[in-house]
Amino acid sequence: MAFFRSERGIGRGEVAESQMEVPIFAAFMLLSSVALVTQHLVLGNNNLTAALSVSMVVFGFTVVRVEVGIFVLLVAMLLSPEIELRAAAGGDRSLNIRYGDLLVIVIFLGVMVKLVFEGRLRLWQPSPINAGIATYYAVCIISTILAYERGLPAWDKRTAFFVMLKMLEFYLIFFMVAHSVRTSKDIRIPLVLFFMVMLIVSCYGIYSIGTTPRVSAPFEKGGTEPNTLGGYLVICLCVALGLMLQARRFRMKLLFFAIILTGFIPLLYTLSRASYMALLVGFTVIALMSRKYFILVALALVLLFSTLIMPEAVIERVAFTIQEEDGRDLVVAGRDLGVNVDKSTYERIHVWRKVGFILSLGPQFLFFGGGISWESVLDSQYARVLLETGIMGFMAFFFLQIQVLKTTRQAYRWTENWMARGIALGMFGATMALVVHSFGTISFLIVRIMEPYWFLIALTVSIRNEALFLHRQRYLAQKKTRVAARKALQPGDEAAQGGVEGGMPAVT
């Protein structure tokens, strides 16, 4: 199921896989067309017919060639429109989904059918991250079940269902891509497409500068979300920096530097202070981990001369954090720090007072919180985790992040391919950046951030597994050589009895 695998070398009597898949694909498309025409004649809904048509085509191509489904997924991550489902959900809160969310399920089913067709039905590739995902999602389920039994007034079961489904969608992307991309060679094409989408989004952001107060991602429903675009661009820029530092040719370094500059411009105009801090932390971590200290010097120079080189809107946005007259008093642990901050910053700090109050209500809230989507907090990922899943959920979430950092670090240290090392290095920095970013927003629940994030984490898992496989192959080859050398030196061996001119055979 690897990308663009070759069918050369097929032995006598064997049938090329494409010769088996194409008839199955043709039969599937014929049956789908009949079913599609039938439902259109019965329901007469053009939008539904169009959505089903695209879904069937994507599913069919995914079964035949998994890379096609992955390519569609990469484009849909940031370039699919949102649909408001307030009436459909029947709840009081507005819920937005994208057609790309539905495509994730369609493509995942196609990958599963492909695995069954190949006789290799396994849901995930081995990695330390699997235990983290299973632990955290299990705690979320337990917390939500407890919330349903208690019937909390501020808890909406419909919203909880969609949030849990959204979280599952992220992990499906992770499992699916990890199955589809197995070697460093398979990474190149999806990585190129990933950065093409990033450049399209960045160009859209640059084009919208001046037309909107804060630059945001395309196709967003219900107003702009600059923090979303900021978090996405931070991930892209961290990966681009990792690749730039690991590239061996000057042209490749120049290419990734150009990508960084292109993404940095719209990031500035998101006016997202959380994204600014996240990028600073991400780049610093990458510089320290790769021992490229000139990056730290460049960051220091940018900060030192920021008032001269940064746009005026960015300077005003950062200065807006501290307000002398109209701000709110900053109080931490009951102590007035004598600093006035803007309303947005104050709410991100004030939410922790709410967390402390809720967790003090009793053991149930302390250990498992009030359930997923309870007291929906938008200003802090960690505050939200504590409110929804309590201390158990917070520990599980922290464990998941540690496992992600462990995996990315191992992939960076173990692989020898420069592109693979660049991705792993960039994702280690991007994960640390999102940790900072999530103190100002719910980064790990935002679809347009998490879909590309888990896609890249899946690539990192494939990189790590390939490095382990190659290491094992080298170990077995060396062991075989040592065994053969020992046998050659044993008395009675033909080589030893006959003698060897020039001395004993060399042992490698």
Image (spheres, grey):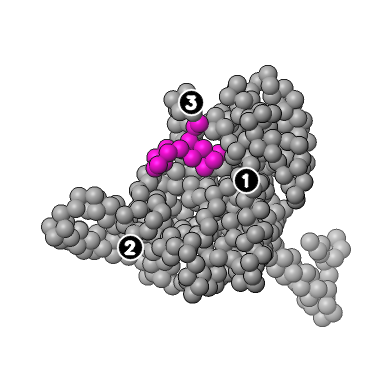
For marks 3 and 1 on the same chain, the one whose residue lies earlier in the sequence: 3
Tag shown at residue 19? none
Q: Which residue is mark 2?
A: 21
* Residue 299 visible from this viewpoint: yes
Residue 93 coordinates in the image, percent (x, y): 41, 54
Classified by dominant secondary structure, the portion drawn in magenta counts as: loop
Identity of the amino acid at label 2? Glu
Residue 75 picture quarter: top left
Labels in figure, total:
3
- The residue singled out by tag 3 in the image is 209
- Nearest-to-viewer mark from 3 and 1: 1
| Residue 29 among magenta residues | no
Residue 104 falls left or right of residue 490: left
Sooner in the amino-acid sequence: mark 2 or mark 3:
2
* Stretch in magenta: 214-230
Instruction: Report x, y in % for residue 23.
Output: 27, 63
> How far from the left and from the top, in percent, is residue 29?
24, 59
Disc 2 packing (10 Å; few <14; some 14–19; many ≥20): some
User: From what the image shows, is residue 412 above or below residue 266?
Assistant: below
Q: Secondary structure at mark 1?
A: helix
The answer for how far apart the CA atoms under marks 3 and 1 are is 27 Å
Distance from Cα at disc 1 to Cα at disc 2: 54 Å
From the viewer's perspective, is residue 117 above or below residue 65?
A: below
